Image: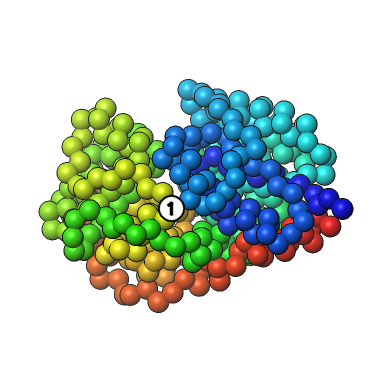
Amino acid sequence: MRGRKVIHIVGKRPEFIKLAMLYNYIRNNTSLRQMVIHTGQHNSANMSDIFFEELRLPEPDVMLGVRAHNAHEFIGKLAGEITTLLNQEERDAVVLTYGDTNSTLAGALSARRAGMLLLHFESGVRTGDFTMPEEINRVLTDRLSDVHYCCTGENLDNLKKEGYGSVIPSELLWTGDLMLDAFIKIEAGRNRAPGSGSYIAATIHRAGNILDREKLSAIISALNTLHRSMQVVIPLHPHTGKRLREFGIELRCAVLEPLGYHEMKRFLCDAEYVVTDSGGVAREAYFARKRSMVVMGHPFWPEIIRANAAVRCNPETAEILAGFDRVRQLPEIAGHPIFGDGKAAQKISDHLVNYLS
């Protein structure tokens, strides 16, 4: 008897990591069939191909190449193409989306248009800041979803407060974080970051920070200042590099090419501190027990801030420098109970088998 089909929709690096944990667990432990639609949101070799190779994922069943002038056009075109694909699939197939990207929202819209059940991993994350595209994407995706897989207990509580599971019919599960599964199970790379001794691992790529010249200049100024006393090493996102050149901003830190998953894990584990505007890197810093600074007005994971494992700051030079002094004073991080026990893939897979039987 053939198992039902799960259609995964992914488009960016963090989604590939989550996909790898769940896809490989389902493949090895169930009779469910799987299909992967890669939207092409990240499509360069060092932003996509290397992740599929390192994480032992098969090539996507479908690779889309939508191009657009802005996010609204991208989401619309992508939703149209995915809907066409889903309409050609078995009617009892289900769609699984991850996180809060434009690919996530396009996948959610497509599933609903095609009349398929929609499952959302990383559901219930809330910042309350609708100036952030991610907040819009995740709230809309949650509203369209039939099943919500939550990384933290607070995510689950957020959904309950909004009426999910009661006023809004849906199924809620606290599964823990697939990113924690990956951090525990995937071996770190062997290569260290350049230089010797202690360093600050930094990643800056959030659109709200890099598209604004004043904000990007302030962040880089702070990193350059920190670099004078402790080496700052930054794997430079292509979009960030492009904006630095366009704005004429000089980055005087140690620069790396974008890293694959194994090397990124080693990069974080070997660092003394972490400075980031990435929700994914913020929680991986927490997994690695590294004290961090999150350069976001409304962090995706306030649980980490409340656990005294990180400091939040706005993209302003003086605030970043003062905040980093506070980071140095944070206590050692004891563990990572916020994000579950590292068995999210097993819990989601077990639920899928029962839900689809």
Q: Residue at x 78, y 36 (%)?
A: 89
Specify whether 47 is left or right of 352.
Answer: left
* Residue 44 on image: x %, y %: 44, 34
Nearest the eye: 235 or 124: 235
Q: Residue at x 37, y 69 (%)?
A: 289
* Residue 106 on image: x %, y %: 62, 35
Q: Residue at x 64, y 34 (%)?
A: 62
Quadrant of the image occupied by residue 310: bottom left
State the count of labels: 1
Q: Residue at x 71, y 54 (%)?
A: 147
**Residue 282 visible in the displayed image:** no
Question: Residue placed farthest to the left in the image?
Answer: 228
Q: Tell me which colouring the rendered structure shows.
A: rainbow
Nearest the eye: 164 or 291: 291
Question: Residue placed farthest to the bottom in the image?
Answer: 334
Q: Which residue position is annotated with label 1? A: 261
Identified by mark 1, the residue type is Tyr
**Residue 252 visible in the displayed image:** yes
